[in-house]
Image: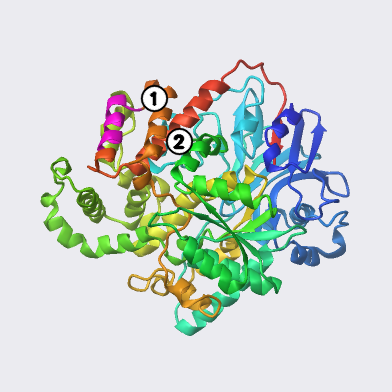
Amino acid sequence: MIGRQCDRLLHRGPDDAGYLIDGDFGFGMRRLSIIDIDGGHQPIVSPDGRFAIVCNGEIVNHPELRREIGPKYAFKTRSDVETLLAAFISWGDDAWLRAEGMYAAAIWDRATRTLRLVRDPLGIKPLFVSEQQGGIAFASEIPSLREIPGYEFDVDEAGVHDFFCFGHVLGPRSIFRQVRAVPPGHALTIGEIGEATLKQYWKPRIQTLHGRSEAEWIEETRERVLGTVGRHMLSDVPVGAFLSGGIDSGAVAAAMTRSAGRSVIAFTAGFPNSKIDETAAASRIAEHLGCKHIVLPIEPETAADVLPAVQAAFDEPSAANSAIPLWYLSRTAAEHVKVVLCGEGGDELFLGYNRQRWAERMRRWAPVVKGISDLLPLDRTSFRSRKLNYLLQHAERFRDGARLKSGFERFFAAVTITPPKTRRRIYAEDFRRRHEGDFAARAQTAFPDGAQLGLSQIEQFMLGDLAVHMPASLLQRLDRASMAHSLEARVPFLSHHFVDWALTMPSGLKLRGNTGKYVLREAVKPWLSPETTKGRKLGFQMPLADWFVGGFSDFAYDAWMSSGAADAGFLDAGAVNSLFEEHRRGQANHGRILYAIAMFSCWWNEQRQSQRSQRPATRQQAALA
């Protein structure tokens, strides 16, 4: 059984497999060999035979940890996973704060028959748990859990509501009622008897330091970026970089060339003839750094061809705008390297998103907007100009955001893919009654002590990006898209040591007027061309508004109509059909929600096909890769 679970994770670890059975407990591992290729076989057992570990991820500071542990642990391998085990044996749960990197780890204690499941501080690596039939199972991906006979997987309506609000499910909830995620920065301990205990060992805290000059912050930023990137290059196999053409990925690629003392291979996804195509900007960075540069042009027809495969790589429905380019880019990168470094986290830490700048504008203009709120909405059906209709749509969203009371509320409003009135329109009547709510309720649930934190509204918004959106969306899509092709994606900005430091920086050094990531731009100026440090943020996103006017819309509509999702009881079929038509006519930009409906349809069709009878389960089962 554990072997079948691990086989479902073959894409995450095609190089090796290992299992351990101890009475009514067992776990297994599929390994992507990066460190100690020949000697790092898992599970790894402690010298005294008491503890065993499986771990998915990389501990990038493991050489330093080994030196600190010293001779009191008799290492048998050069593996970073054995280092994590030794750290736990030496320091207990303090090990998780000392370890730097990304990991989902399971440690079995044969003496006390206790299982400890641990997820890295930022949630870079996934870890799911299901307790059914008197046992517990865990895995890196939900499909592995579905190999267990007798386990049930019922769709959670709250997860579906999350999806149509945000384009993903908000953890620790999953799309299935019987499955939950171990939250980032938590350790879950399961003993032979009694209740499982969940303990948080880290969370992001904004603790601003004052009294330092701008020049000092810039110099330290440069040093910190070099340090975290250098540590994340630790590997026994080739390492490349994802390059979008912006500051974050450019800074990472530049720091890589300095740390390695040589050029690196960089990969870029492009969208020909689109306003968001960053191929030229990425090429300038690659040429400036002397990188070998591989560019993949993505056309609407290409995206339509791979969309079902992309959704199949995810445990749950995902409408991440960058999922297709990341999946497509990972497939090509895996032909050249086993590891890539990415710039994820830079926008969250240094206030680089457009939505963060717009939130500040909403806060400043709130008194004025409230006074003229009755001027909107306007009836867009009377306008024939697509550009004017899109502008009015943005104006309505700005007005609604200005009415909100806190940065937390504006965060949730900013990351929604559908405004509340659109959901009220497309939800089936019974489903809508069961899942009504507002941004204030979301903010209170996610940040119950938010008012006591003493944060400015932009700091509240930044905390929402870090604690909610990043683990639920950004990191999930990066992990699934890359691991679908056995490619390890590392995120140097998301070392919790780097995050802790970045959260001490005054927000005025991050967002300077309309310039986001000000201090990061200044820090990397010596490394990159002037055009790069002045460029605007785009990233690996798709031109959905344009694509859904053309042939891609036909594909999405066919997916919606043929999947059975229209009969699932969540959405009103007539209302969804109207969205497709309005978008084609230019009355409104429904690109994000139409893409979400297409992805949900692909996922729903896959769920229908995967239903099968199962036998009762009698053992605790687990798989990690």
Q: Secondary structure at mark 2?
A: helix
Q: Label 1 crowding class (10 Å Cα cut-off): few <14, some 14-19, many 20+? A: some
x, y percent for residue 472: 49, 46
* Front-lying residue, 51 or 552: 552
Is residue 100 visible to the viewer in this orientation of the structure?
no
Q: Quadrant of the C terminus?
A: top right
Residue type marked 1: Met
Residue at screen point 72% across, 47% down:
55
Q: Secondary structure at mark 1?
A: helix
In the picture of the structure, the residue carrying the numbered disc 2 is 599
User: Magenta part of the protein: which range?
Assistant: 571-582
Q: Position of residue 281 (x, y in %)?
A: 48, 66
Residue at point 58%, 67% (across, down): 252
Q: Residues within 10 Å of mark 2 (few under 14, many from 20)?
A: many
Residue to which mark 1 is pinned: 561
Q: How many marks?
A: 2
**581 within the magenta span:** yes
Q: Is residue 229 above or below residue 415?
A: below
- Label 2 or label 1, whichever lies nearer to me, is 1
Colouring rule applied to residues: rainbow
Answer above or below: position of 523 versus 327: below
Residue 101 image point, x, y percent: 65, 58
Q: Is residue 101 visible?
A: yes
In the displayed structure, would residue 409 be above or below residue 603? below
Residue pushed farthest front? 273
Q: Seen in the image, is 163 located left or right of residue 485?
A: left
Nearer to the camera, 513 or 341:
341
Distance between mark 2 and mark 1 Cα atoms: 12 Å
Q: Amino acid at mark 2?
A: Met
Q: Is residue 568 magenta?
A: no
